[in-house]
């Protein structure tokens, strides 16, 4: 089927065969082949009654967004519903893994002058869960600092409950977690499942990623004698462990959207300001702030006294992005060749080409053996080609109601086990050019074989989604020992008509950060996953100073961003600010609080 109400990637997925979807990295995300049910994101207006009639499950989110589960056979009926404005499929999310408080001027605001600790503010960590048994997340009397913990990956058993309004996972309250601790000093079972009290808490942070993030943002340091105390040590926490995906081993954007919705609703119920930490990202999209995930984050940011902080990602030094400009000028090289190296035993690969819709460009594909396909004319729908051991799906998309950009999507699928290795070429031939600029991305480095990437990569616009949400505080990374920019940290700017929005907003320590992980062990981490919680905790302290203490009742959202930008300090090697690498500079919380 083909519908302008469906995003390009979803149209491509629906046009693909079951076999093609199974071999693709992206097309099968959100699809359950056993039940032939899709998990989809919809933007709607009015009510969802007609949608509920044809859906298996509907989860209503804030600001007229919803996550639905619907049989593939019902999607043609879905697009006919007037209240449904636009539909997208989920994408995979990846962790952004690769002496912070002092260099970020946080110690100064925790001392006698301000004595800011995060008291009265919520810190929400949407991640891999948390080791809730650690003393770092407990008060002096042994009670937990966690107000709510939603593990999306669990299936409720007798005595457990699913959070109201959401059709998955298990919710644990502060009271239930406290009931599982009859003795503050009791020994925890090896699997971090507390069974000694009246309540059994089954959630686990298997990777330790979420525990480390939470410890930086809000750990109180009780497990280390205060050595590894976080930024907002007396804040309370809401923890969301993102659910297990249907396939592929990664959580999905649909789960993230529900997690954000959940923490904002809980903060409203508790009447407390909330700083939200997101250390996940994905590499799909135009990076122009117009996807439903990006727009949802921007819309939700307007609802409550909140501040959403998102890591920019770790694609800055990879070969996953390139860009250029084609021209009709006869003196210029009318054709542009983009070379893409594919290493041996690469199971599949997709390429996104984003351009202005006003430009008309034909594309040719040259295989490593020299076989040329094209030029392929622009036409809607999926076009299929076969070259040696590789099947190629090519899809010319259309602009959406939210974006003037056009996508050309290529999926390289194996006819056997792997696609052809070697250097592939994509040749762009201008037909009618007004602007001529194009951007190209492949999946994140962590999902590809080492060495697969563009031969002439471009480091700008390597930020991941949803760090591209315009109202979010987007955080990059630097090395706090050498005061040097971390080359892995993604770079701005955004693309298209959103290019004027500054990304990142600032950078924070993200190289060899020492913090607490599962079991209380001290580990070192690198990546924007771990620079972001420094900013999240700082946002919590700003909201404590402003809202809780009555200095500024409006210190949330964009105002927090403005204060953090103003207080940021310059970085060695950068003359102009803001810039695409470090934004307005490095985090300095003490300079962000008005005199």
Image: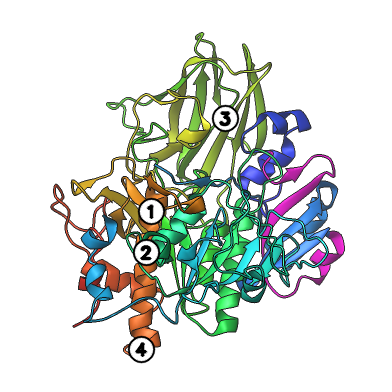
Residue under label 1: 515
* Residue 268 visible in rendering: yes
- Closer to viewer: mark 3 or mark 1: 1
Residue under label 4: 549
Distance from label 2 to label 4 (Cα)?
21 Å
Q: Is residue 44 magenta?
A: yes
Q: Residues within 10 Å of mark 3 (few under 14, many from 20)?
A: few
Distance from label 2 to label 3 (Cα)?
56 Å
Coloring basis for residues: rainbow
Q: Quadrant of the C terminus?
A: bottom left
Distance from label 3 to label 1 (Cα)?
54 Å
Distance from label 1 to label 4 (Cα)?
29 Å
Q: Residues within 10 Å of mark 4 (few under 14, many from 20)?
A: few
Q: Is residue 338 magenta?
A: no
Residues shaded magenta: 28-54
Mark 1 or 2 closer to N-term? 2
Q: Position of residue 296 (x, y in %)?
A: 55, 65
Q: Position of residue 121 (x, y in %)?
A: 45, 78
Asked if the residues shown at circle 3 and circle 1 are in contact, with their CB atoms under 8 angstroms apart, the answer is no
The residue that appears at 72% across and 55% down in the rendered structure is 154
Asked if the residues shown at circle 1 and circle 2 are in contact, with their CB atoms under 8 angstroms apart, the answer is yes
Q: Secondary structure at mark 2?
A: loop
Residue under label 2: 230
Mark 3 or 1 closer to N-term? 3
- Closer to viewer: mark 3 or mark 4: 4
Q: Position of residue 29 (x, y in %)?
A: 67, 42
Tell me: 215 left or right of 514. Answer: right
């Amino acid at each position: 089927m083909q519908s302008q109400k469906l995003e390009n990637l979803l149209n491509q997925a629906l046009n693909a065969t079951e076999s093609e979807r199974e071999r693709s990295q992206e097309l099968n995300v959100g699809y359950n082949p056993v039940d032939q049910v899709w998990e989809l994101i919809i933007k709607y207006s009015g009510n969802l009654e007609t949608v509920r009639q044809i859906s298996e499950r509907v989860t209503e989110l804030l600001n007229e967004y919803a996550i639905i589960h619907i049989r593939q056979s019902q999607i043609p009926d879905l697009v006919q519903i007037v209240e449904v404005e636009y539909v997208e499929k989920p994408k995979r999310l990846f962790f952004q893994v690769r002496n912070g408080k002092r260099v970020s001027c946080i110690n100064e605001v925790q001392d006698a002058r301000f004595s800011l600790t995060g008291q009265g503010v919520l810190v929400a960590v949407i991640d891999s869960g948390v080791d809730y048994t650690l003393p770092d997340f407990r008060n002096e009397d042994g009670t937990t600092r966690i107000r709510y913990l939603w593990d999306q990956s669990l299936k409720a058993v007798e005595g457990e409950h699913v959070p109201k309004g959401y059709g998955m996972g298990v919710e644990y309250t502060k009271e239930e977690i406290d009931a599982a601790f009859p003795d503050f000093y009791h020994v925890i079972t090896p699997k971090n499942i507390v069974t000694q009290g009246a309540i059994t808490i089954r959630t686990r942070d298997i990777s330790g990623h979420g525990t480390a993030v939470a410890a930086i943002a809000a750990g109180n340091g009780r497990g280390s004698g205060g050595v590894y105390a976080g930024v907002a040590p007396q804040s309370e926490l809401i923890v969301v462990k993102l659910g297990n995906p249907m396939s592929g081993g990664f959580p999905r954007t649909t789960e993230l959207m529900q997690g954000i919705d959940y923490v904002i609703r809980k903060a409203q119920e508790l009447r407390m300001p909330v700083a939200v930490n997101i250390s996940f990202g994905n590499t799909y999209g135009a990076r122009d702030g117009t996807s439903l995930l990006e727009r949802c984050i921007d819309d939700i940011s307007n609802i409550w006294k909140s501040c959403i902080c998102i890591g920019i990602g770790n694609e800055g030094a990879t070969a996953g992005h390139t860009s250029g400009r084609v021209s009709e000028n006869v003196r210029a090289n009318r054709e542009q060749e983009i070379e893409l190296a594919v290493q041996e035993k690469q199971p599949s690969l997709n390429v996104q080409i984003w351009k202005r819709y006003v430009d008309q460009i034909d594309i040719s594909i040259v295989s490593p053996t020299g076989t040329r396909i094209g030029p392929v004319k622009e036409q809607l729908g999926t076009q299929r080609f076969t070259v040696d051991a590789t099947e190629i799906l090519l899809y010319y998309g259309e602009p959406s109601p939210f974006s003037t950009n056009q996508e050309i999507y290529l999926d390289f699928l194996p006819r056997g086990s792997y696609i052809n290795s070697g250097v592939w070429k994509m040749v762009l031939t201008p037909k009618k050019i007004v602007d001529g600029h194009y951007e190209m991305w492949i999946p994140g480095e962590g999902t590809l074989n080492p060495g697969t990437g563009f031969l002439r990569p471009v480091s700008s616009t390597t930020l991941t989604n949803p760090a591209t949400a315009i109202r979010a505080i987007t955080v990059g990374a630097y090395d706090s020992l050498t005061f040097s920019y971390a080359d892995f940290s993604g770079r701005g700017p955004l693309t298209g008509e959103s290019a004027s929005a500054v990304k990142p907003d600032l950078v924070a320590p993200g190289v060899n950060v020492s913090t607490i992980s599962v079991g209380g062990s001290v580990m070192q981490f690198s990546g924007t996953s771990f620079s972001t919680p420094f900013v999240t905790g700082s946002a919590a302290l700003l909201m404590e100073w402003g809202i809780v203490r009555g200095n500024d009742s409006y210190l949330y959202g964009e105002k927090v961003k403005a204060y953090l930008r103003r207080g940021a300090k310059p970085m060695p090697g950068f003359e102009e600010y803001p810039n695409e690498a470090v934004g307005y500079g490095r985090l300095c919380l003490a300079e962000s609080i008005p005199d």
